Amino acid sequence: MNETINKYKEDLEFFDDVMDKYEYIIDLGKKSPLLDEKDKNETNKIKGCQSSVWFVAHKEKDKLFFDTYSDTVIVRGLAFILAQIYSNHSPKEIQSFNREELKILNLDEIISPVRLNGFTSMLNAIYAHAKKEI
């Protein structure tokens, strides 16, 4: 997970301007895979986000994978980043990972406090899925 976080940290540090970083996240959202319409339901919807956001967790062997979607492209980019960081790891690996490591992305300098709260809600959903699978 640290390796993926560091990749996004480096990508974001490439840009000097906060708006360029914001655009980078938007571009990730535009490129993220679509979610099947049947998965856009209340069960998969993340509570606590200003935008509509859906996270679908599925397990392959002993690893969790996350598919995401949001009706807002910036949030879709943030969800994509989280899915990339946490996918392909076991529930135990996720549960034992210190989420404070994400602070090196400095998202609080890029996105609004409301979006940051939504990011935390998405993160909480990932940890809840992992806990359920242990």
Image (cartoon, rainbow, N blue to C red):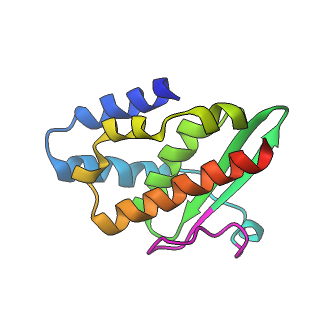
Looking at the image, which residue is at 14% across and 45% down? 17
Looking at the image, which residue is at 48% across and 29% down? 4
Question: In the image shown, does 47 or 24 lie closer to the viewer?
Answer: 47
Residue 2 location (% of width, % of height): 47, 26
Question: In the image shown, does 70 or 94 lie closer to the viewer?
Answer: 94
Magenta range = 41-54
Q: Is residue 118 left or right of residue 130?
A: left
Residue 1 location (% of width, % of height): 53, 29
Say whether residue 30 is visible: no
Number of numbered tags placed on the structure image: 0
- Confirm whether the magenta stretch covers residue 86: no
Magenta stretch: helix, strand or loop mostly: loop
Residue 110 location (% of width, % of height): 25, 53
Q: Which corner quadrant of the image does residue 69 belong to?
A: bottom right
Say whether residue 16 is visible: yes
Q: Is residue 120 left or right of residue 61?
A: left
Residue that sits furthest to the top in the current view = 3
Q: Is residue 131 left or right of residue 108?
A: right
Looking at the image, which residue is at 44% across and 57% down? 119
Q: Which corner quadrant of the image does residue 6 belong to?
A: top left
Question: In the image shown, does 127 or 114 lie closer to the viewer?
Answer: 127
Residue 32 vertical position relative to residue 4 in the rendered view, above or below: below
Image quadrant where one finds the C terminus = top right
Residue that sits furthest to the right in the current view = 61
- Confirm whether the magenta stretch covers residue 47: yes
Residue 89 vertical position relative to residue 45 in the rendered view, above or below: above
Looking at the image, which residue is at 34% across and 40% down? 103
Question: In the image shown, does 19 or 93 lie closer to the viewer?
Answer: 93
Q: Which corner quadrant of the image does residue 130 belong to?
A: top right
Residue 33 vertical position relative to residue 112 in the rendered view, above or below: above
